[in-house]
Amino acid sequence: MVIDAHIHLDQYPTEQIADQIKRWKEGGINGVVAVSTDLHSCYHTLSLAERFPDFVYPCLGWHPEQRLPTDKELNELIQLIRTEKHRINGVGEIGLPHYSLKQLGNPPLEPYIELFTILTCEAKAQELPVAVHAVHNKAPLALAVLKEEKMTKAHFHWLKAEAEVLKEIIHEGYFISVTPEVCYRERDKRLVQSTPMGQLLLETDGPWPFSGPFSGKSTTPLFLFDSLEKVAAIKGKSIVEAKFQLRQNIEKLYLSYRGGSIN
């Protein structure tokens, strides 16, 4: 079982998605954890999960690298999470902004922290994991929220953080995913070296494009096999051993429960 732990499936061309999923399946991909970015994205992701129930594991959330939701949008999102809690596999993508702060006019972080806290508490109430976007100096802030709310199941996707913050994330038992950058970027290789095998996941964050051996190629979950090979080599594991552990990790975090009910 090879599953992409974090992908924006709703951002792939709708008219091509059936053929793409068919190719991914034929290539050995068993599923994707599809995250959402706003309300429209949430509904689209749910529709994809309905079309491909054996392949798409949906998460509902509000991506932090954009404007804050209105009260009406937030209330609708929370109600949607509650209504669909037995059909979804997590709350995400949620977290704190970093890259877009300048474009947003450098807004205060407090409202974003409040939003992240609200959605984290909702995920905890529904016994769902959270897919977290928090990089660089935002990672410790997000970690503080998760600890304050006693959140036990969290996934820091494409993490970029100082060594001491990484240690604390690992200590809390949270999961950390690497992208295909692990195949060509030293920072990601060091992240894999420092993270226990039992807390690692593989993701593409597709359709986000990559460099190195993937330059000029459309991002696909099939890239995971390159990442798998690199992670296995870094950890001194066989590909079979690494694949087995990574499968156990994603099952433990995302696939064992839907709203608290074992599948």
Image: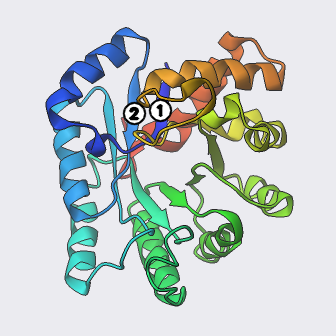
Q: In the picture shown, does residue 51 fall above or below 42?
A: above
Q: Residue at x 69, y 55 (%)?
A: 160
Looking at the rendered structure, the kind of residue marked 2 is Val
Q: Residue at x 49, y 18 (%)?
A: 1
Of residues 81 and 202, the one nearer the viewer is 202
Q: Circle 1 sits in a helix, a strand or a loop, which is it?
A: strand
Q: So how many labels did they put on this image?
A: 2
Q: Which residue is mark 1?
A: 4
Q: Is residue 180 left or right of residue 125?
A: right
Tell me which label, 1 or 2, sits earlier in the chain: 1
Residue 114, x across and y down, in percent: 48, 84
Looking at the rendered structure, the kind of residue marked 1 is Asp
Q: Residue at x 28, y 38 (%)?
A: 12
Name which quarter of the figure residue 77 lies in: bottom left
Q: Circle 2 sits in a helix, a strand or a loop, which is it?
A: strand
Name which quarter of the figure residue 192 lies in: top right
Please rate how many residues cluster around mark 2, counting C-alpha atoms within 10 Å: few if below 14, some from 14 to 19, many from 20.
Answer: many
Q: Which residue is mark 2?
A: 32
Residue 43, x across and y down, in percent: 18, 54
Q: In the picture shown, does residue 59 fall above or below 236?
A: below
Q: Is residue 252 visible?
A: yes
Please rate how many residues cluster around mark 1, counting C-alpha atoms within 10 Å: few if below 14, some from 14 to 19, many from 20.
Answer: many
Name which quarter of the figure residue 227 lies in: top right
